[in-house]
Structure formats: C-alpha cells, structure tokens
Image (tube, rainbow, N blue to C red):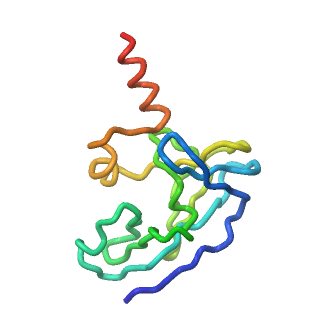
C-alpha cells in the first residue's frame, strides 16, 4: 500500500539555496529551540521490499513503514546532515517532524544527524561535508 503525503506548510519561513553540501534549507526568520520546523513528507511505503526502498531520501519510520521523500515538493529533503546539528527528527504517529534543538538564527542552514546507518552507507564513503568534519580535515592537513 502506498499513501501520498503532500507537503504541509512549514511552520516557519524557509528557503532552499546553495550550501557547502549542494542545496540546503535556510531559515528566513528566527526559530526558537524545541519548535517544529517542517514535516518530512512523500510516498508512504508499507512493507515494500528492501530493494524498492534503497534511495537516498528514504526515511525509515519502523520495520514496516518508510517515507520516500524524493519528490522535490518535499522541502524537508533539502535539510543536510551534520555531525553537530541544530535540528532533529521527531517521529509521531507516522509523521516525521524536523524540530529545532536550539535557537536557529535568520540565514542559518538547518541540519540534522541522518543516523549511523545512513552515515555508513552514503556519507562515509565520500566523506562528510558538514562544517565540523570539514574544519577537522583542514586542521589535520595543516599539521
């Protein structure tokens, strides 16, 4: 069974623009700590075979349910990974909300940690491009 969840309005004004990791999602207004920013939406996949859910934008809800967030109308798909994130995912009743972990300033890019499995499969082979890891690599090359 596949259900389609369309993009709900974001709780705050956001903009997709160039980032160090490609395209990113940026705050156009201050976002207080602990607030819902945006919902991660897309096709809801129930009991799909593993090979049907191997895409980069798959958000695993639990053993039998995933969200395929690949459609471009899923604005939350532009939130990049960071090893030092300012947001986090919050799964409630089959919905995935991205919430602020701290106050987010105007113009700041929104990040969350994609998790160990995604990191090992997609990020580690290419190298992490978050600010923390890039800074760490630059310091290591200067020594």
Left or right of 81? Residue 56 is left
| Depth order, front residue of 106/24 | 24
Left or right of 25? Residue 61 is left
Determine the residue positioned at 45% across, 48% down. Answer: 113
Determine the residue positioned at 42% across, 32% down. Answer: 133
Query: Which residue is most to the bottom?
Result: 1
Image quarter of the N terminus: bottom left
| Depth order, front residue of 79/31 | 79
**Residue 33: image x %, image y %?**
68, 49
| Depth order, front residue of 60/9 | 9
Image quarter of the C terminus: top left
Q: Is residue 59 above or below residue 82?
A: below
Determine the residue positioned at 58% across, 67% down. Answer: 39
**Residue 124: image x %, image y %?**
30, 42
Please count the marks in the image. 0
**Residue 118: image x %, image y %?**
33, 54
Query: Which residue is most to the right?
Result: 29
> Which quadrant holds residue 53?
bottom left
Determine the residue positioned at 67% across, 65% down. Answer: 10
Q: Is residue 125 above or below residue 99?
A: above
> Which quadrant holds residue 56?
bottom left
**Residue 115: image x %, image y %?**
38, 52
Query: Which residue is most to the top?
Result: 143
């Amino acid at each position: 069974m596949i259900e389609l969840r369309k993009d709900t309005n974001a709780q705050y004004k956001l903009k997709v623009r160039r980032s160090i990791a490609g395209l990113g999602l940026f705050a156009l207004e201050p976002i207080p700590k602990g607030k819902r920013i945006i919902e991660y939406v897309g096709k809801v996949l129930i009991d799909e075979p593993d090979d049907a859910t191997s895409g980069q934008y798959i958000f695993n809800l639990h053993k039998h349910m995933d969200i395929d967030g690949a459609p471009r109308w899923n604005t939350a798909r532009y939130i990049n990974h960071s090893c030092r994130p300012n947001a986090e995912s919050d799964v409630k009743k089959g919905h995935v909300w991205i919430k602020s972990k701290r106050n987010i300033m105007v113009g700041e890019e929104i990040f969350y940690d994609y998790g160990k499995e995604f990191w090992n499969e997609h990020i580690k082979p290419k190298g992490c491009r978050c600010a923390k890891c890039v800074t760490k690599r630059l310091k290591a090359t200067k020594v």
